[in-house]
Amino acid sequence: MKDFWLSCGHHLLDRGEGGGLVVTDEFLKAYLARPELAPPPEACAAERALHHALLENPRRAVAGREIATIADPDARENFELLIAFRDHLLAHPTLEAAYLGLAKNGVGSTPPLFLNQLVHVILRNALDACEDPLALRAAELFFRPQRITTHEGALLAADEELISGKNGAPVSPLVAMLGLPDPDAIDVLNEENAQDYWDRSDRFDFALDLTAGRRGQAALAQVIATFLRHMLAMETDIEPRVELRDAPLAWYVGLDAAASRIGDQLWNGEVLDPADAARVLGLYRMRFREAARLAPQLGGEGIYLILAMTPDGVLRMKPQNLIAGLPIRSPERVS
């Protein structure tokens, strides 16, 4: 079995009896190595002392007064966010259960970076046996924003951080460490180069073809089904659709904020203007194999999933919408 996504830190975690990921000290220490948390040379004594104490024992209780004595306001905020996130992880038996809690109860002030990292490692666990590079590339949409463009009639998604770095903006230290290809060398993943994904999975430098009717759309449907099976123990059949026409919109889930707004318009009977319609990247019809898990008002109707980009051409998936937005009973947490 081939390994992939080493940067998510899955090697630092344990697995519980139910297959969920269990937090370890090594995993918590990885957050302390981030540049936002590592004290710079000019850091005050309080910041250095707290960072050192957490490296010695990343589970130790941290009183508010310890953080309050840090001189730099940015460092104080970073430690407040880290400790709140760490405490949330430690309050749950698995990372999956911790994510379910955030999805169901609201993410609050949890930074998007932490949410994306959590989804990254959870999907690494869920897709552990996956041998389809196209599905793995589609899964990147769950935790890495994408820049959408059209090329020779194809709708392509390329990693936003990668593209930003090529345009002169700074990239993350991890991406810089792994190295990036030549700016003109972003390949579209296809059957011919698919096996190259294994060596490049942490570079996020393949583009994905999301054109309706092509493999990329089907691969994303496969990943959504895998995510729901892993997180909610639900079996689903998800079918990519080219368009929504004369279909009963009994329920829908926007897979991102832009899609949720478009779904609201359709729900309210509004006609999409051409600009909004052009921003729809994907449409899926989902059916549940266990009808008893569905809310009774749905009957036998399917649920529609909508994927869309922002007006400036960026896709930012919110996989927590799949947890919070489905009309289901008693989701089962991975433990």
Image (cartoon, helix red, strand yellow):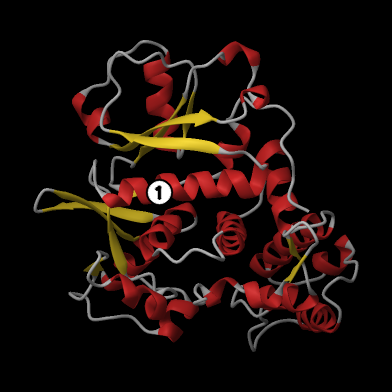
Horizontal placement of 61 versus 223: left or right? right
Does residue 261 lie above or below 83 as drawn? above
Percent coordinates x, y for residue 27 in the rendering: 71, 74
Q: In the displayed structure, does residue 222 sit left or right of residue 57?
A: left
**Residue at the outermost left position:** 152
Q: Residue at x 78, y 73 (%)?
A: 24
- Viewer-nearest residue: 64 or 219: 219
Residue type pointed to by label 1: Leu
| Position of 140 relative to 332 (above/below) | below
Label 1, secondary structure: give it.
Answer: helix
Q: In this view, does 198 lie above or below 210?
A: below
* 140 and 147: which is toward the camera: 140
Q: In this view, does 23 lie to the left or right of 142?
A: right
Q: In which quarter of the image is residue 16?
A: bottom right
The percent position of residue 87, horizontal first and vertical second, equals 81, 59
Residue 264 location (% of width, % of height): 43, 21
Q: Mark 1 points at which residue?
A: 220
Any part of residue 322 in sight: yes
On the image, the x and y values in percent for residue 213 come to 24, 42
Q: In this rendering, does residue 37 appear at all?
A: no
* Residues packed near mark 1 inside 10 Å, few (<14), some (14 to 19) or many (20 plus): many
The front one of 207 and 241 is 241
- Residue positioned 22% across, 34% down in the render: 278
